[in-house]
Amino acid sequence: MAVTLRRRDAPPGTPRDRGDGRSSRVEKVDNDTSGSTRIAVLIDADNVSAKHAGAVLEELATYGIPTVKRAYGDWTTTQLTSWKSELLRHAIQPIQQFANTVGKNSTDSALIIDAMDLLWQGNVDAFALVSSDSDFTRLATRLRESGKRVFGLGRRKTPESLRRAVDQFIFLEVIQEQDHAEDQHAAAVTGDAAPDEAVSTRINLQSALTKAINATSGDDSWSTLSQVGQHLNRTHADFDPRDFGHAKLSSLVDEQPYLETRTEGSRRQVRLRQKRGSKTAGTRSTAARTTSTKSAASKSTAKKSTAKKTARKAAPAEAATSGSGP
């Protein structure tokens, strides 16, 4: 009797090796997630303020459907009181995790275990880790290794290790702009200066755009806007046009003085603005060479003409000299 062995060392949806180095099936979440993408939203309530709950879910709804919504924390403490109304309003499931030992964050462990369970169940296409805690860095990379897209949502103070570990990182300050005003107000009340965290975390826009265009441009130096956007998402997971005051990349690019755009059919294209001086200098150089060539030719013609005139004058003199002989 034939016995079929089934591997249990990989979660559902994981490509299986056929023995020839290739996979029998590859399931991959497209970078451009559609409205049917199922997203598991896992919130570190100990690390994120309840005031962000609505903005987080509204933002993620633009990428797919939040089918799993869980918030982890010790709900017996008074620190999470503000979360209770948000849990009811947005149908978020609270996951109780007691702080068993002082100084140890057991909430992180519970979230990580649940994430791996969801991965093995295979009922979601993407994960959204709502936290500014770098302890979730390894979880993010593990989920991506299994072919899942991972969103990260946290404050600007989020360590770079976590921001770089996800496919796309979204700052909570961007999706809820009033946070900055509240921080400034709190600083004024306490007398402390609120640090401008944007200075240390915001990318160098001109450098990032220039590198993206150079990496994706063709022989004519033009790149499509979609190619530039995809390159930025790969190299800067936390890049967001809204962080620079624009809803879309197209409007952000239009306002950059060092870039120029055009529309070819239905595609927007962009390139680095060409320096006018370079073309003018080339024209001047060509004109100078042409003038120099003409001048040399004129001088050569003049010399030949003078030589001919001298030869004509010398001919009669020689004839007269030869005729006066004995």
Image (tube, rainbow, N blue to C red):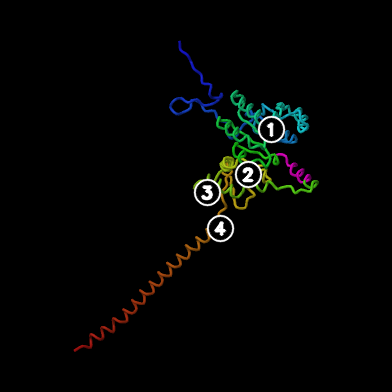
Q: Earlier in the sequence, mark 1 or mark 4?
A: 1
Residue type marked 4: Arg
Q: Earlier in the sequence, mark 2 or mark 3?
A: 3
Q: Residue furthest right?
A: 189
Question: Dot 3 corresponds to which residue?
Answer: 221
Query: Residue extending furthest top?
Result: 1
Question: What's the residue at 25%, 86% (across, down)?
Answer: 321
User: From the viewer's perspective, is 309 left or right of 218?
Assistant: left
Identify the amino acid type marked 3. Answer: Ser
- Kind of residue at badge 2: Ser
Question: Which residue position is annotated with label 1?
Answer: 44
Looking at the picture, does residue 188 appear above or below residue 275?
above
The structure residue drawn at horizontal position 62% and vertical position 53%, both measured from the top left corner, is 257
Q: CA distance from mark 4 to mark 3?
A: 15 Å
Q: CA distance from mark 4 to mark 2?
A: 24 Å
**What is the distance, in whole Å, between disc 2 and disc 1 at their CAs?**
34 Å
- Magenta residues (range): 175-186
Q: Position of residue 174 (x, y in %)?
A: 69, 41
Q: Which residue is mark 4?
A: 276
**Overall secondary structure of the magenta section:** helix
Looking at the rendered structure, the secondary structure element under dot 2 is helix
Using the numbered discs, state the Cα–Cα distance from disc 1 to disc 4 in whole angstroms: 53 Å
Q: Amino acid at mark 1?
A: Asp
Which tag, 4 or 3, sits closer to the chain's start? 3
**Seen in the image, is 161 located left or right of residue 23?**
right
**Helix or strand or loop: what does disc 4 sit on?**
helix
Vertical relation: 321 (above or below) 53: below
